Amino acid sequence: MQLSFTKMQGAGNDFVVIDATRAPFRATAEQLRRLGDRRFGVGADQILVVEASDTPEVDFRYRIFNNSGDEVEHCGNGARCLVRFVHDKGLSAKKTLRVQTVNNLLELRLQADGRVTVDMNRPVFELARIPFDAVGLVARKVGGFELWPLALPGGATVEVAVLSMGNPHAVQIVGDIDTAAVETIGPQIERHPRFPRKVNAGFMQIVARDAVRLRVFERDAGETLACGTGACAAVVAGIRLGLLDAAVEAHTRGGSLRIEWAGGDSHVLMTGPAQTVFEGTITL
């Protein structure tokens, strides 16, 4: 299969974007893994597939595959790249787009400075919907939120805030993001049996009430330079714990994202960059 693609990045989180608005894109898990492979393919954290919508109030459908070949529910940095992609390709001139993912409807706005704001919808806190198995655990209440103890291999226990931004997240607060054991503890949390669909493991250092530093070990992808839903989950957790204000700059290794949440039933807003890196074709 000869495939045209666009390589994009948002705060260092990189993507292969496929235009499937005119013809369907069908690829095996093996072909998706090849596409995402940094040595034998194009290389990306995730593959994004833009499809035409069959619903009048929705502009596009948007599918997301990890470089492992597995389809996932949500990617905030990818959503920003989608807006730039459809504008650059002439697929839409709208400044505000409504996009359907596998389990969510997103509103995306292109700002005058070229950044993109994504309405990430409401965070989900119901444990069954995350999903998170808390049977037999006793949470520690901080502010208005729970920190849950997770027993890890080797006898260590970490406390995490759990929530969903359309995909599951476990956020822990660390003193120094540079020395946090992301590479060792991250995969242990990601595959912890308390999370039946696995989980994105976030490590957040609070710098001030309006600023955090963040690293995320993503589900099925490993640590990435930035994670949009992870930034949203971390900031929401920090706000509910009483540690952060309603507007926060989340500094990742790939760049900064502005996260806003007014609490309660409010939607989470994420604003950040999206850029095209190069275009090409590949035989899969």
Image (cartoon, rainbow, N blue to C red):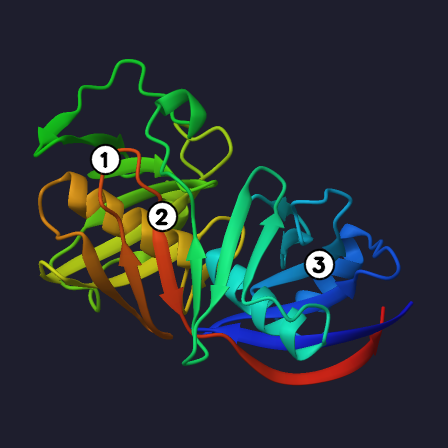
Q: Give the SS element for disc 1.
A: loop
Residue found 48% across the figure and 28% down from its top = 196
* Residue type beneath disc 1: Gly
The image shows residue 58, relative to residue 49, as above or below, that is above
Which quadrant of the structure image shows residue 135? top left
Up/down of 171 relative to 17, above or below: above
Q: CA distance from mark 3 to mark 2?
A: 25 Å
Q: Which residue is mark 3?
A: 49
Quadrant of the frame with the C terminus: bottom right
Q: Is residue 20 left or right of residue 268?
A: right
Of the 4 image quadrants, the one containing the N terminus is bottom right
- Point out the frontmost of discs 1 and 3: 3
Asked whether 131 or 116 is in front, the reply is 116
Q: Of the numbered discs in the image, which one, if any, rests on residue 201?
A: 2
Query: Which circle's residue, 3 or 2, is located before the other in the chain?
Result: 3
How far apart are the alpha carbons under marks 1 and 3? 42 Å
Disc 2 crowd rating (10 Å Cα; few below 14, some 14-19, many 20+) is many
Question: In front of the other: label 3 or label 2?
Answer: 3
Q: Position of residue 110 (x, y in %)?
A: 49, 69
